Amino acid sequence: MQKPNMKLGEILLYAGKITQDQLDEAMKDQKKSQLKLGEIIVDKGWLKPEEIVEALEQQLGFPIVDLTKYEINPNVATLIPESIVRKYKLIAIDRKENRLIVAMVDPLNFFAIDDVKLYTKMDVTPCLATSMDLERVIEKYYTNVLTQKALDEFSDSFAPIEDEIDTEQEMLEVATAPIVKLINSIIEQAMRSKASDIHIEPSANDIRVRFRIDGDLQEIMVLPRNNLSPIVTRIKIIGKMDIAEKRIPQDGRVEMKFNDSEIDLRISSLPTVYGEKIVLRILDKTNFNFTKEGLGFSKDDLQKLNRMIGQPYGMILVTGPTGSGKSTTLYTVLRELNVASKNVITVEDPVEYKLKGINQVQVNTKAGLTFAAGLRSILRQDPDTIMIGEIRDAETAEIAVRAAITGHLVLSTLHTNDSPSTVARLIDMGLEPYLVSSALIGIISQRLVKVLCPKCKEEYEASESEKRLMGIDADKPVTLYKPVGCNACNNGYRGRAAVHEVMLVNENIRRLINKGADTDELRKQALNDGMRTLLQSATDLALKGKTSFEEIMRAGYTLG
């Protein structure tokens, strides 16, 4: 074992992990930045975090702890103040009498150990963990602590009033710092959890707060029933909604900054028998950096997409249920089409992401600016490319189709189960088949499936029934994976990926549309022309070990 006062750079050099030139370069960069030496070495791609941890273990004898699998004692996880935890990147994971077991990214940092000893009045046994694992665990435990602290502070300062209170009284209550802190901490916790929505739901006895994470709702906390009025009022205030109106649904919107992120909150209130329910949709505008290649299209489907957007005119539709990533796909395509020589205009409800160089119009039904009215006005603005947020009615559909056949590239969304049924939906809206066949370039149907956590997923042999449903020969051995759950994920999943069904409207499809062919005939022809169904796309992900059989069935339920 080496001397405990050796520095990290010396240890890595001694272990043969880096060269002297690399160490000199890293130390030079360290003087210019606030980063630690280990972070610089990882950023430069010389070593992985795990390799640094292994070198420290070998040279110094510090044990390694895998925080994704380690059962952290919740009673000790927050014993160390957050300021120390985040400053030194460490967390208490267990306690043995008067000794605290502390996972650290740098167990050689004796200043950190001394600070922990000073605050906790306990001896410290350091162990090693990767920086990434520590960040996840710190966010998990300390974000909850902040929210609970804000709740306690609010509860202590808020005097419950059983009867209805007037508007002035409400305004006075919600102007206080505790309620502001509580709402801010809930939003911040949602952002750290990468939630897409926050649900605040009153019941007879309490208020349930749930986050939608990776497509599933998860209960985060339960608040006292008498806190509903100031919470709702505060949210309405930030959303510029009418706080006096509690009988009808309302919509609001606000742009906020949290840390380095710019977020857009879409707020919806709904009167229920127990009071107003609030849903906040979170749009992180700083994280919109998708490319066509990053959307998850297969190689063949990506080629089809490129053919579609390369057309000078016609209509491209993206279909799927709410929350399936349709807007993300459209915005990504729009950025591709946004060049100086083209006039790109959108009409949306609401504008989810503001794109530089694109003229975006916000629908305002109260003022008479509907999709149809906005689209008519757009056509007088000499557009090359038009994006309609959603085709909701026959009038909008007809204008969009006529725009597509008169020299404009039109992009829009529609709520249908799969690509072939989209044609039937347009005809059901009253459009003539010849107009539909003339206008359509292609249809993209998509779903989002949950991605298995790579740290805890378990493999198993697929059953005959599973293979049959996936369209795989029963005699062929197939390995699938199932979710387990660990500290690094949400019940075995981490993140989501898109699966697609891309149908090019070629001459074969056009001929069938003009003949009045039904959805099954269109699907059969599209499959003959090389279309991969949602089920097939999801199955491919499962066979690669990225998702589970349950997600295959959920995404590919049309079984096309």
Image (cartoon, helix red, strand yellow):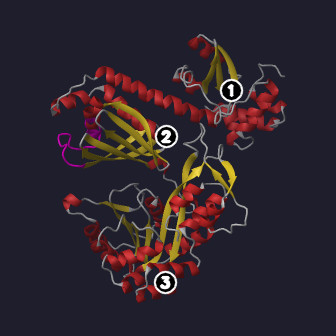
Q: Secondary structure at mark 2?
A: loop
Left or right of residue 373: residue 263: right
Local packing at callout 1 (Cα closer than 10 Å; few below 14, some 14-19, many 20+) is: many
In the figure, residue 3 lies in which quadrant?
A: top right
Residue at 56% over, 75% down = 531
Sequence-first disc among 3 and 1: 1
Residue at 55% over, 25% down = 74
Q: Main secondary structure of the magenta part?
A: loop
Q: Secondary structure at mark 3?
A: helix
Local packing at callout 2 (Cα closer than 10 Å; few below 14, some 14-19, many 20+) is: some
Q: Position of residue 87 (x, y in %)?
A: 57, 25
On residue 106, the disc is: 1
Q: Position of residue 230 (x, y in %)?
A: 26, 32
Residue 24 visible, this angle:
no
Residue bearing the label numbered 3: 509
Give the residue type at disc 2: Ser
Give the residue type at disc 1: Asp
Q: CA distance from mark 3 to mark 1?
A: 62 Å
Q: Which residues are magenta?
A: 233-249
Front label number (1 vs 2): 2
Q: CA distance from mark 3 to mark 2?
A: 44 Å
Q: Secondary structure at mark 1?
A: loop
Residue at 60% over, 39% down = 488
Residue at 36% over, 72% down = 383
Q: Position of residue 517 (x, y in %)?
A: 43, 85
Q: CA distance from mark 1 to mark 2?
A: 26 Å
Residue bearing the label numbered 2: 193
Q: Nearer the viewer, residue 244 or 83?
A: 244
Q: Position of residue 108 (x, y in %)?
A: 71, 22
